[in-house]
Amino acid sequence: MKETEVVAGKRRRPGGRAAKVTEAVHRAVLEAVLEVGVEKVSIPDISRRSGVRDSTIYRRWVTRENLVLDVLLTGSGRTLAVPDTGALRDDLVAFATALDVYLKSAIGQGLLRVFASIADTPEIAESRNTFWQERFKSVAVIIDRASERSEIAADVDARAAIELLIAPIHFRHLLSRQPCDREFIDSLVSAVIGYCGTASCDEKRF
């Protein structure tokens, strides 16, 4: 497939062309990660799979590491939906369980490996910080809704509560390689609920 087929129509506005290039490249990276693993993803292969010239990929993402991280962060944000069961404990259990399942997947494992091995640059740091800021903001709605239902204190630090839930799960997947079974997730959720019932701060972060 030629690049012109991916972004067919020279009269398209730049935004439309850029979006099609991004979509094709992202799809190709995810396909490659699933087929060969994150370590073997290469820009020449992504160019072949996507039909986008490697010069275009290098111009936009500069390095293979930037490209892979961008795709995996984007995929993570789309995959992990925020549950709304009507109860704080059930929301936290559902989200923690979904996170565990995601981190077991090829895409989740790829993201962990990239985070563990990639060298920090200003661009990568910005991508990572933006991802976590947006992710915490979206997941914090679980805490906000519980506060509105008067399940927990009104002045809970939502980000700290979410960090308390997800940090041990990431630790087990990345470092200790221990399973995150239901008993473990229940213990994390109980700790978060205990924190939410006693925490006090001047204002929420979100």
Image (cartoon, rainbow, N blue to C red):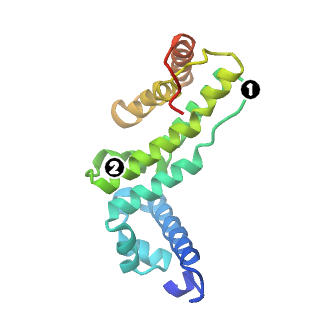
Q: Who comes first in sequence, dot 1 or dot 2?
A: 1
Bin the neighbour count of mark 2 within 10 Å (Cα to Cα): few under 14, some 14-19, many 20 and up.
Answer: few
Q: Label 1 is placed on what type of residue?
A: Gly
Q: Residue 173: where, in percent of width, then height?
A: 41, 35
Q: What residue do we see at 49% from left, 84% from top?
A: 3
Q: What residue do we see at 38% from left, 31% from top?
A: 171
Query: Among all residues in the image, which is located at the extreme top?
Result: 198
Q: Is residue 89 left or right of residue 114?
A: right
Look at the numbered disc 2 and give the secondary structure of its residue: helix
Query: Among all residues in the image, which is located at the extreme bottom?
Result: 10
Toward the viewer: 105 or 118?
118
Is residue 30 in view? yes
Look at the numbered disc 1 and give the secondary structure of its residue: loop
Q: Tag on residue 134?
A: none
Is residue 94 in view? no
Q: Residue 55: where, in percent of width, then height?
A: 36, 79
State the CA–CA distance, disc 1 to disc 2: 36 Å
Q: Is residue 177 above or below residue 1?
A: above
Toward the viewer: 18 or 106?
18
Bin the neighbour count of mark 1 within 10 Å (Cα to Cα): few under 14, some 14-19, many 20 and up.
Answer: few
State the residue position of label 2.
125
Q: Quadrant of residue 85?
A: top right
Q: Is residue 3 above or below residue 107?
A: below
Query: Among all residues in the image, which is located at the extreme front?
Result: 202
Q: What residue do we see at 39% from left, 48% from top?
A: 128
Q: Tag on residue 86?
A: 1
